[in-house]
């Protein structure tokens, strides 16, 4: 694992960087997750023909968790843009899952003609609503955040979602809360609008168990190619890493 110090701060993000000859792929994980936890197995199944970079976002995984940072989609995209600049990457493929999708979308807007392809897996495109984890976490009691976050963790663990809880426990509660508030409010312009306007190749991956989904046909109409991971739902990196790797290969 390597580390990168965010410009103008002492904050460090940590990441895996697997060598490969083809266009680098940056993996951006979702709420409660970590690149170092979610995507190592997927990366191995891709065969390392592409350079693969698995980042733990600030506030998550093995990266630093500063209390003074403002954890929004835009702020995450901002330091990731500098990270890519400092790695001197002329062309890049961005992969974003769930709430990592809006970060991938805003990052793609910052990088523009340096994006080779954008691959999203069940990304947030609109403001999150009742039933979504980001909606629940975004409505925790801010005045007692540490305790309300612990209670929510116990609820998720009792529901049987132990893999996700394992990584969510390693998130700074403030980081999960603030980015979830951002998910509830949505982007301006919306992440969906950004996605539709991009001219580079765009792909959207669904887990088979997440279907039917109204966006399955809507996205096709906007020139976004669809892939489906069999025997998997939203957490496809854990539920079927072989299937997710194959879906990504189909996009590549």
Image (spheres, rainbow, N blue to C red):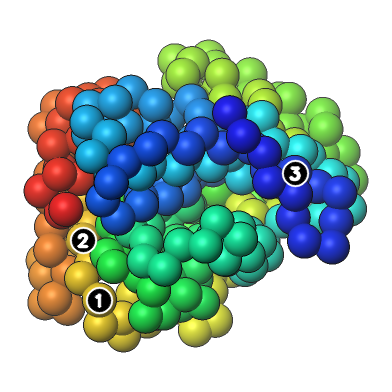
Q: Residues within 10 Å of mark 2 (few under 14, many from 20)?
A: many
Q: Residues within 10 Å of mark 1 (few under 14, many from 20)?
A: some
Residue underneath mark 2:
203
Q: Position of residue 137 (x, y in %)?
A: 63, 44
Q: Which mark is residue 245?
A: none
Report x, y in % for residue 178. 71, 54
Alpha carbon separation for disc pair 2 and 3: 30 Å
The residue where tag 3 is placed is 12
Mark 2 or mark 3, earlier in chain: 3
Kindly indicate the quadrant of the structure image that contains residue 83: bottom right
For mark 1, what is the residue? 200
Q: Quadrant of residue 115?
A: bottom left
Mark 2 residue element: strand
**Callouts 1 and 3 close, C-beta under 8 Å:** no
Q: Is residue 43 something that shows in the picture?
A: yes
Mark 2 touches mark 3? (CB < 8 Å): no
């Amino acid at each position: 694992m390597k580390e990168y110090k965010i410009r103008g701060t002492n904050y460090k993000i940590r990441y895996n960087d697997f060598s490969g000859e083809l266009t680098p792929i940056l993996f951006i994980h979702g709420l409660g997750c970590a690149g170092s936890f979610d995507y190592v197995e997927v990366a191995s199944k891709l065969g390392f023909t592409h350079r693969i970079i698995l980042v733990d976002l600030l506030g998550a995984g093995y990266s630093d968790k500063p209390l003074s940072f403002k954890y929004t989609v835009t702020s995450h995209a901002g330091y990731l843009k500098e990270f890519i600049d400092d790695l001197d990457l002329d062309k890049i493929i961005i992969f974003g899952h769930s709430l990592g999708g809006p970060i991938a979308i805003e990052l793609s807007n910052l990088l523009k003609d340096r994006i080779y392809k954008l691959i999203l897996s069940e990304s947030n495109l609109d403001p999150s609503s009742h039933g979504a984890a980001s909606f629940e976490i975004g409505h925790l009691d801010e005045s007692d955040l540490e305790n309300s976050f612990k209670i929510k963790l116990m609820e998720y663990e009792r529901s049987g979602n132990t893999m996700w809880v394992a990584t969510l426990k390693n998130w700074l509660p403030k980081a999960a809360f603030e980015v979830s508030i951002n998910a509830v409010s949505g982007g301006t312009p919306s992440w969906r609008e950004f996605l539709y306007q991009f001219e580079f190749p765009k792909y959207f991956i669904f887990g088979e168990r997440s279907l039917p989904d109204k966006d399955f046909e809507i996205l096709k109409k906007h020139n976004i190619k669809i892939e489906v991971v069999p025997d998997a739902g939203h957490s496809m990196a854990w539920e079927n890493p072989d299937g997710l790797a194959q879906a990504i290969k189909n996009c590549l």
